Image: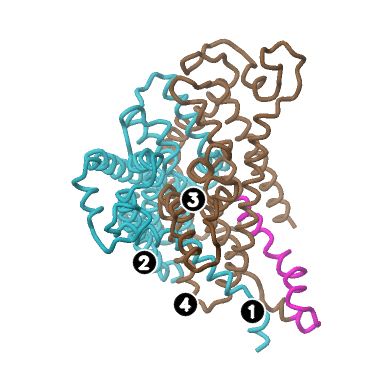
Chain colours: A cyan, B brown
Amino acid sequence: MALRSVRHYPGFAGVAVLCLTILYVPLIVVMIYSFNASTSITNWGGFSLRWYGEVFTGPDAPRFKAAAWNSLTIAVLASGISTVIATAAALAMLRAGAFRGRSLTFALINLPLMVPEIVIAVSTLIFFTMISFQTGYLTILIAHITFCIPFAYLPIAARLQGIDGSYEAAARDLYATRAQAFFLVLLPLMAPGVISGALLAFIISLDDFIITNFVKGAGMETLPTAIYGSVKQGIKPGIMAISTMMLAVSILFVTLSYLINRKGRPVTSG
Amino acid sequence: MAGPGTNAPQGEASFRNIRVQLLLPTWAMIGIFLLLPVLLMAVYSFLTKEMRGGVIWEFSLAAYDQFFVNRGLFGDEPATLEWTYIAVFWRSIVQALVATALCLAIGFPTAWFIATRPVATRGVWLFLITVPYWVNLLIRTVSLRFLIRENGPLNEGLLALGVISEPLAMINTNFAVQLGLFYSYLPFMVLPIYAAVERYNFALSEAAADLYASRWTTLREIVLPIVKPGIIAGCLLVFVPSLGAFLAPNLLGGAKNFMIGSLIEEQFKKSLGNWPFGAAVSMILMSLVLILLLLYARNASKSEVR
């Protein structure tokens, strides 16, 4: 009884419910209105999938298709490459003993989290302009790989920290080469962290607007910049359909990552 | 001879002799494509602007002069402090502070509530809190704009319920920006506070209750000092991105309520920009943020020593 009362504060449950309501209502409203049959975004005209049809066949379809393709390929490449880089960094930081410059390297890895996004955007644009590097797909990709590294690093390092060194030591004692010990023993143990890191990097890349907007150059669009461009002229129902589809992708990813993490947990404790 | 290294020397340091090769990609990527550009930006802020965007390589303090000094319309009056840009910074700081306060007011009770659930339900709550963070920020901001606009669902709903007789003007106000920032970064407040409350030893609260402290006295005198690191981390995680935010002020605030992010962005638009000035404003923003982070790091290490 006493235990319960010190944990309970009147009103806190209400605030928690309010918190969830605030977080979800805007998303649910847009989701509902994306199925609105009416051309007006104000009135409800019955259920319809017409805006989803228009996304794929309407006049804006080629632009959004190209943007979606760019977003997707950049996110796949950026998350893949940054995950490999971050995994290597995590091994060097946690499995290579103490070394000079370790804390400096740690600061460098976290630099993209400490510098405000708009400042990263400005400085990257200045850099590419100065070395006369044509802005476009490649500059977006480079910028994304760079700022995805810490997001991939954090879950990977957290996972690696919880894995005892004796596993690799045992493998080496049994005459495994270092590569074998890594790929056959350590990497499978690290897998949940590596996958979480890659998923997080993927979402972060897909999410980015500001930095992409600065370094994309003329004529190049990703989904966020294309959506931003059309939203500036008012919210059209097609945008809500695209938003709902992106919402579905995000929720699929977070659910995947949640399940992977849950599955990975017993290994850490055992 | 202590530490984990002694138990399994091979495993703990098995990558020692290829350390440099493993770190090289990280050093190269972040070093060349972030650290170097930031340093370059610092240099740019001291250059002369070129009329059609870009710079002339000539040292100049014009950018900082434009930010801080007012010489009148024709530049011939005695120099006084220029308020235009300081006011933009001030507005951004106030907006970010209000958003942080809102996040704390909602985030603390929520985090406390989640941390006091049975372990099985905690996971579900945390999952629900983190899902919006994974949803595209632009889409979340657009959704909010759709919801609170003049004849949007929120106004229509309140009208239909008879709560209000005229649509509330929410969009393009200061409040809309604060709401947008609050909505963008709320999960950042909940998670670190949750982590702190989860580690809190509730026996302390029971001891306080046994000594006739009221619930709220216990909260103020015992709980808050202990979970303070989590609260500070949460506030920082909300305040810092809010300060340089671009989407919320742009899509929700309208032309009157722009913040630092928009001021910087404007300087890099094709023909009417001023790159050195944009670089200088970015430098000032970054310095503010780094000072905050340094203060935080110093405080954190101090309390660790204790």
Amino acid type at mark 2:
Leu
Let me know if residue B107 appears in the view: yes
The correct choice, above or below, for B207 with respect to B175 in the image is: below
Determine if marks 1 and 3 fall on one subunit: yes
Determine if marks 4 and 2 fall on one subunit: no
Tell me if mark 1 has few (under 14), some (14-19) or many (20+) residues whose alpha carbon lies within 10 angstroms of its own: some
Q: Do the residues labelled 1 and 3 touch (CB within 8 Å)?
A: no
- In the rendered view of the protein, which quadrant contains the N terminus of chain B? bottom right
- What residue is shown with label 1? A8
Q: Nearer the viewer, residue B46 or A148?
A: B46
Side of B12 relative to A219 (left or right): right
Let me know if residue A189 appears in the view: no
- What residue is shown with label 4? B120
Label 3 and label 2: CA atoms lie apart by 26 Å
Q: Are marks 3 and 4 in contact (CB under 8 Å)?
A: no
Q: Which of A169 and A213 is in front in this view?
A: A213
Q: Tag 1's secondary structure? A: loop
The single residue placed furthest to the front in the displayed view is B165
Quarter-wise, where is residue A46 in the image?
A: bottom left
Quarter-wise, where is residue A2 in the image?
A: bottom right
Confirm whether the magenta stretch covers residue B221: yes
Residue at the (29%, 61%) spot, across then down = A45
The single residue placed furthest to the bottom in the displayed view is A1
Q: Which mark is residue A259?
A: 2
Which of the two labelled residues, at mark 1 and mark 3, occupies the earlier sequence position? 1
- What residue is shown with label 3? A94
Label 4 chain ID: B
- Measuring from the top left, give residue A39's x and y in whole percent: 29, 52
